[in-house]
Image (tube, rainbow, N blue to C red):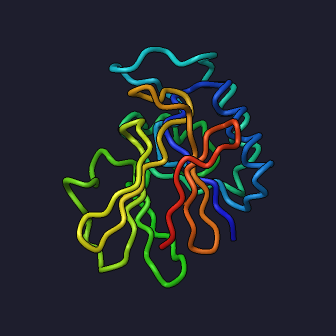
Amino acid sequence: MKFLIASDIHGSAAGCRRLLEAYEREGAQRLVLLGDILYHGPRNDLPGEYAPKEVIRMLNEKKDEIYAVRGNCEAEVDQMVLEFPVLADYMILLEQGHAVYATHGHVYNRDHLPPMKRGDVLLQGHTHIFGAETEGDILILNDGSVSLPKQGNPATYMTLEDGVFRIMDFEGNCLRMVNI
């Protein structure tokens, strides 16, 4: 199964539209959202084409294909309008015999790892900066941000297929590739 992984849409209809176009182009079967879907948050500027109601409509149309976790900007009211679960702090995906611990990153992150075994993967967003690194025997991946990338990075998403993670920009360039 191919997953497309993204975070930090922050209510940007333009970013969500590009994300769903990439999802179709990539031929993924599931869209994994790592939080901060609708609200821009008090520390962020408004993203381009800020239109949370439009994001709600676009994502609800894909509700049967979305797995999502709660970001630091999600609230109970978001669950009232989104037709797929968004309030779990984490989810576990299994890939090639490894646990992939998917979370937003504001609770569990490089500095505060969840219980993990050698060879497991921590998958997060939150910082708006894409990256891949190891901490001991744990792989830590960050998909970046769909709408509000930081530190001069482009807007990015990630794919996972057959044990290979690829961090992609929306022009189709592979910025990083990591095998489990």
Q: Nearer the viewer, residue 53 or 131?
A: 131
Q: Report the front residue among 110 and 41.
A: 110
In the rendered image of this protein, does residue 87 appear above or below residue 161?
above
Residue 12 percent location from the top left of the image: 60, 25
For the N terminus, the image quarter is bottom right
Q: Residue at x 61, y 51 (%)?
A: 84
Residue in front for this viewpoint, 23 or 119:
119
Asked where in the image residue 31 lies, by quadrant, the reply is bottom right
Question: Compared to 145, does 14 lie above or below?
Answer: above
Q: How many tags in the picture?
A: 0
Indicate left or right for 34 with 12 as reference: left
Give the vertical position of 53 relative to 36 (above or below): above
Residue most toward the left? 111
Q: Residue at x 76, y 43 (%)?
A: 61
Q: Position of residue 111 (x, y in %)?
A: 19, 53
Instruction: List the single residue furthest toward the bottom.
Output: 97
Kindly indicate the quadrant of the structure image that contains residue 90: bottom left
